[in-house]
Image (spheres, grey):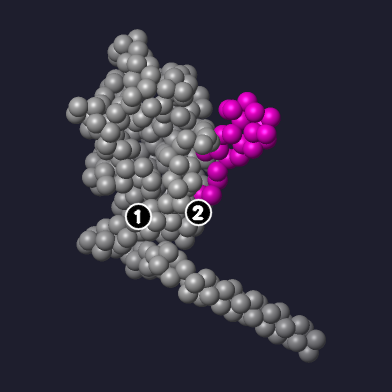
Amino acid sequence: MTRVSIITPFLNAGRFIEESIQSVLAQTYDNWELLLVDDGSTDGSTGIALQYAAAHPDRIRYLSHDDRQNRGASASRNRGARHAEGEYLAFLDADDVYLPRKLEVQVQILDAHPEVAMLYAATEYWYSWSGLPDDAGRDWVWRRYGAKPDTVIEPPKMLVRFLEDGGTVPCMGGVLVRRGAVQSVGGWEESFRRICTDQVFHAKLCLNFPVMIVDVCLDRYRQHENSSCRTVERAGQLDAAFETYLTWLESYVAAQPAVAPTVRAAVRRALRRHRHPVLDRLQRQARRYDARLRALASRTLGRTLHSDS
């Protein structure tokens, strides 16, 4: 029985996809399958994917949408999940790579914690792949967890932390999740084609299931000018995309039968930062000023009591 299904959607990824596939073949854990989901590529990546599927028919499968349409990352991941046979799902974008012990480490932890639906690890933001001298020292490891590693984090705590941190979520290459949990929340939201797909996925899982953090780096997130995030950032569309996500989340939370007030409050605060940025900035400045005044008053009172004694 296959334990892990790795889903790799790709769109014109001929420059990088072979290195991504090779990083899966190099895993120290070998009970996996790789689902290469073609999102309407027109370059050589389709041929590379078909070549690897033919060379490893028992482990690698090629999938595409009907009529080889381009339907976006969320729809492609859903297609992979529908064809997956593994108990666990892992995700690898076609321009990123796994480190060799990615699956070995995470499968062992999820096996040991049956109450946990999803775990994630640190990710290296990878610049040095380019070989350029200016990129040699730019690699860094993302560890903005928002909670204590190696502990079970009950819902909805992780979602609230993500919202408080400006929407930062783990990279999908660092994730391992139970397929049944993904199915139970309806998978990925296909209206989100490129941007905020990960935020939506994490929101649905973290609202409903316990999650866990592994404090180790297990994948590399390649930084390059043609990535989806960089393209949208250059177009100045990131803020609008994130507000769209928060508006979706507001409706999604409202439709749930029982949601903690902390979640609704966190969503409102996050939306306020986008809908009323000046007011939000003034309110945050006022809170910081009030906190400094309280701290100063406390220190002054402490010195007074000390001198009186």
Q: Which residue is found at the position 36% from the left and 30% from the top? A: 11
Residue 170 seen by the camera: no
Residue 119 seen by the camera: yes
236 vs 204, nearest the viewer: 236
Left-right relation of 295 to 166: right
Q: In what quadrant of the picture does the C terminus appear?
A: bottom right
Q: Which residue is found at the position 64% from the left and 37% from the top? A: 138
* Numbered range of the magenta stretch: 123-145
Label 2 secondary element: loop
Around disc 1, counting alpha carbons within 10 Å, would you say few (fewer than 14), some (14 to 19), or many (20 or more)? some
Q: In what quadrant of the picture does the N terminus appear?
A: top left
Which residue is farthest front?
Answer: 235
Residue pointed to by mark 1:
245
Q: Are marks 1 and 2 in contact (CB under 8 Å)?
A: no
Q: Which residue is found at the position 53% from the left and 49% from the top? A: 144
The amino acid sitting under disc 1 is Tyr
Q: Which residue is found at the position 51% from the left and 27% from the top? A: 99
Residue 303: which quarter of the image?
bottom right
Residue pointed to by mark 2:
146
The amino acid sitting under disc 2 is Gly
Label 1 secondary element: helix
Q: Which numbered disc flags the more N-terminal residue, 1 or 2?
A: 2
Say above or below: 146 vs 293. above
161 vs 72, nearest the viewer: 72
